[in-house]
């Protein structure tokens, strides 16, 4: 496993920092990856912090494909170790909608308050056992040498009867976790990170990268 710093080429007294770029501008995601990868030995940067400004078209047919599209695009621009994720909510009664279109559901500029209320309306009248849903997150990595891999995490739950909670973001207020008796926006950030789809995928990715590097 490489340390955080290695000698710079041709400059024995100078050191360079190994960088891991997470292909996002979302501060919530950056906080989560910094918590999990804090002891990884790399400086962790967002795309903005790395000076990367790309318009990436996510035209894959799965979370895994979209995550790889983002990671490969940023790696092509930087040559660094790059991680990217794609995630969303799948509701079984709605044929797993909104799925890979979660961020674009009802339009990218539509507030999540409106989106959440619409999804609750669409499953109105269904009993608990018919309201099953899950958050899915695929995290892709492209190594400096071009190798890539993907890890996927899943958090099972169901659609709540009404939005609740202020701790989360996106669809968290309508994602009910039976084991807590609360939505994922009502539990603490520490509780959520321990079970979340993104947390699972990031921890699996960290383990895989430590073995590969």
Image (spheres, helix red, strand yellow):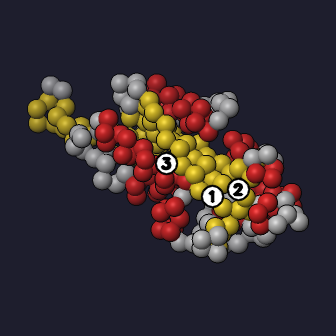
Labels 2 and 1: the sequence-earlier one: 2
User: In the rendered image of this protein, does residue 81 appear above or below residue 184?
Assistant: above
Percent of width and height locating residue 87: 61, 46
Secondary structure at badge 2 equals strand
Q: Secondary structure at mark 3?
A: helix
Is disc 2 surrounded by few (<14), some (14 to 19) or many (20+) residues within 10 Å?
many
Q: Which residue is mark 3?
A: 201
Q: Is residue 113 visible?
A: no
Closer mark to the observer between disc 3 and disc 1? 1
- The label on residue 29 is none
- Please rate how many residues cluster around mark 1, counting C-alpha atoms within 10 Å: few if below 14, some from 14 to 19, many from 20: some
Residue toward you, 132 or 2: 132
Is the Cβ of the residue at disc 2 closer than 8 Å to that at disc 1? Answer: yes
Q: Of 119 and 179, which appears nearest the observer?
A: 179
**Image quarter hosting the N terminus:** top left
Residue at 49% across, 48% down: 201
According to the picture, the residue beneath numbered tag 2 turns out to be 133
Q: CA distance from mark 3 to mark 1?
A: 14 Å
Looking at the image, residue 164 sits to the left or right of residue 18; the answer is right
In the picture as drawn, the residue positioned furthest to the left comes out as 12
Residue at 60 percent across and 73 percent down: it is 180
| Residue at 42% across, 44% down | 205
Q: For the residue carrying disc 3, how many other residues have a C-alpha within 10 Å: few (<14), some (14-19), or many (20+)?
A: many
Q: Is residue 158 above or below residue 206?
A: below
Q: Position of residue 65 (x, y in %)?
A: 59, 32
**Corner quadrant of residue 75:** top left
Measured as percent of width and height from the top left, residue 133 is found at: 70, 56
Which label sits on residue 156? 1
């Amino acid at each position: 496993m490489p340390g955080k710093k290695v000698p710079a080429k041709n400059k024995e007294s100078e050191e360079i920092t190994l960088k891991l770029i997470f292909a996002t501008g979302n501060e919530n995601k950056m906080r989560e990856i910094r918590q999990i990868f804090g002891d990884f030995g790399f400086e962790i940067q967002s795309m903005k912090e790395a000076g990367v400004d790309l318009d990436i078209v996510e035209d894959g047919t799965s979370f895994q494909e979209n995550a790889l599209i983002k990671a490969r695009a940023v790696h092509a621009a930087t040559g660094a170790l790059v991680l990217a994720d794609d995630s969303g909510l799948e509701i079984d009664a709605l044929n797993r909608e909104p799925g890979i279109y979660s961020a674009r559901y009802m339009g990218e500029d539509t507030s999540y308050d409106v989106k959440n209320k619409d999804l609750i309306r669409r499953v109105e009248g269904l009993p608990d056992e018919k309201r099953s849903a899950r958050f899915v997150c695929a995290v892709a990595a492209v190594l400096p040498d071009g190798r890539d891999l993907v890890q996927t995490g899943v958090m099972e739950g169901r659609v709540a009867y009404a939005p609740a909670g202020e701790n989360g973001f996106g669809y968290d207020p309508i994602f009910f976790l039976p084991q807590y008796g609360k939505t994922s926006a009502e539990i603490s950030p520490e509780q959520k990170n321990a079970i979340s789809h993104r947390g699972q995928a990031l921890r699996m990715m960290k383990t895989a990268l430590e073995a590969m590097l």
